[in-house]
Image (spheres, rainbow, N blue to C red):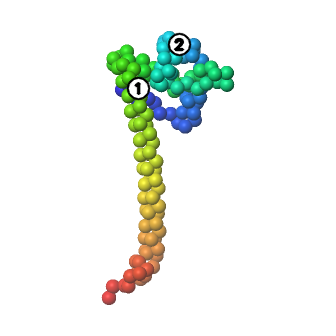
Amino acid sequence: MVFDSDDGDRTGDDLRSRPAYFIGVVAEITEVHPQTLRHYERIGLVKPSRSPGNVRMFSQEDIERVHLIQRLTSELGVNLAGVEVVLNMRESHRRQAAEHERALHDVTKRYEAEIARLRNALRRATRDPGAPPYRNRRPPR
C-alpha cells in the first residue's frame, strides 16, 4: 500500500532520523527540484534539520517522506492540502499504535505476574494435600 513503510529496529530508526543529506543530494535522490523541497518545507510537509551554519540537512526519513509526497501527488492525484491531511493522519495513527503497544505491554506484564502468582499458590496448595487450599477457608466438614 502507498502509506506503508518498513518498521526497523530502534538502532535503524535512529540512523534513519539522523540528518545526513544536503538539499542538492536529496533533490537528486528524489528527482525533485530543490525549490520544490524548499516549498515543501515552507508549507510544513517536510521539516529538515539545520546545521550550525543554518544549512538544511535531510534525514533518510525526510527522503522517504518526500517519496511519499511524490507518490500521493503523482500517482493518486492528491493536492498538497490533501497530502498534509494524509501525513497528519499517518502520524496520528503511528502515535496511537505506539500507545496501544505500550498499553498491551503493560497488560501483558500484569497478566504474567498474575499467572506467576496463581502458579505459586497452586504449588503451595498441592504440597500438603491435607492443608486447606486457601488460608482463610476452613476444611470441609
Q: Amino acid at mark 2?
A: Pro
Q: Is residue 94 above or below residue 78?
A: below
Q: Residue at x 43, y 67 (%)?
A: 118
Residue hosting label 1? 84
Locate the N terminus and report the quarter of the image it occupies.
top left
Seen in the picture, residue 118 relative to 14 is either above or below; the reply is below
Q: Nearer the viewer, residue 91 or 10?
A: 91
Looking at the image, residue 13 sits to the left or right of residue 107; the answer is right
Residue that extends furthest to the right in the rendered view of this protein: 52
Q: Tag 2's secondary structure?
A: helix
Q: Is residue 91 above or below residue 47?
A: below
Please state which of residues 84 and 111 is positioned toward the viewer in this rendering. 84
Could you tell me which residue is drawn at 37 percent across and 84 percent down?
139
Question: Measured along the vertical axis of the image, is residue 46 above or below residue 93?
Answer: above
Residue picked out by circle 2: 34
Residue sitting at the far front: 42
Does the rendering let one see residue 23? yes
Q: Quadrant of the C terminus?
A: bottom left
Mark 1 or 2, nearer chain start: 2
Q: Amino acid at mark 1?
A: Glu
One can see residue 20 in this view: no
Q: Residue 71 occupies which quadrant of the picture?
A: top left
Disc sitting over residue 116 in the figure: none
Residue 25 picture quarter: top right
